[in-house]
Image (tube, rainbow, N blue to C red):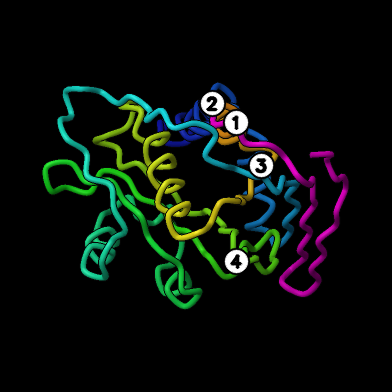
Amino acid sequence: MNMSHVEKPSGIIDQLRDKRRHHLLLQTLSRVLGCKGIEIVPYYVTQEFLKHETEPRVDPELGPVAARLLSPAEIEEVYTHPESKVMGDEATLLDERCLCFGLKIKGEMAACMWCNVHRCHSRLARFFLKEDEAYLCSAVTFKAYRGRNLAPLLRYELYRYLNQIGRTNFYSITEVFNTPARKFKEKLGARHLRLGLHIRLFNRCDWNITLKRYRI
């Protein structure tokens, strides 16, 4: 008996079970449809803000954490990391004149994310920003540093930096099916402004529909 034909379905089932355990099954199915040329993505336009001055605590074993806007050389360092592919295309982010903010520990990049102070350039929703606004996107904590509470610290430090340059209202896009992302932003105190639906068929037809607006 050829065991590869027996093990393959089991492997797929195990992957789906793992996705369901992490509340990502619907998001995975959406991406599968996307590979077939059918993209249907419900999403929230989410507002974030610096709600308190208390710095999130991280694992004390990490030692000092340096938070700063990254230089071009440091951005190149980020994109040589094998896990950087989840951040999106570097050229697109640079063309959008985005800023990259990061956390470094003992000289090593631990986490980073991008922000656009000109417009929200998400494939799901696009809009221009006012002088006191910023769009946050493409965040990653590298695997070696996950579970150390760096994601809240990264956001907190970026909020503080943006406040210093006059940006006090922050927006991000949250896919409805991405439960971990929604729960993370709830813990940050973020709030939904709008529920939208993005539909794209075979790279020909593209719709963006507002389903609901939330009272602030």
The amino acid at mark 3 is Leu
Bin the neighbour count of mark 2 within 10 Å (Cα to Cα): few under 14, some 14-19, many 20 and up: few
**Position in image of residue 99 (x %, y %):** 41, 64
Q: Is residue 87 left or right of residue 67?
A: right
**Position in image of residue 112 (x %, y %):** 35, 50
Q: Who comes first in sequence, dot 4 or dot 2?
A: 2
Which mark is nearer the camera, 3 or 1? 1
Determine whether label 3 and label 2 are within 8 Å by CB: no
Which mark is nearer the camera, 3 or 4? 4
Q: Who comes first in sequence, dot 4 or dot 1?
A: 4
Residue 69, image quadrant: bottom left
Q: Which residue is mark 3?
A: 29
Instruction: Label 2: state its secondary structure.
Output: loop
For residue 167, which numbered disc appears in the image? none
Bin the neighbour count of mark 1 within 10 Å (Cα to Cα): few under 14, some 14-19, many 20 and up: few
Question: Is 49 rendered above or below residue 135?
Answer: above
Which residue lies at the image location 65% right of the left edge and 45% below the top edge? 47
Instruction: Label 3: state its secondary structure.
Output: helix
**Position in image of residue 179 (x %, y %):** 62, 31
Q: Who comes first in sequence, dot 3 or dot 4?
A: 3
Instruction: Label 1: state its secondary structure.
Output: loop
For residue 189, which numbered disc appears in the image? 1
Which residue lies at the image location 57% right of the left edge and 57% below the top edge? 135
Q: Which residue is mark 2?
A: 22
What's the CA distance linking mark 3 and mark 1? 29 Å
Q: Is residue 1 magenta?
A: no
The amino acid at mark 2 is His
Q: Which residue is mark 4?
A: 131
Instruction: Label 4: state its secondary structure.
Output: loop
The amino acid at mark 4 is Glu
Bin the neighbour count of mark 3 within 10 Å (Cα to Cα): few under 14, some 14-19, many 20 and up: few
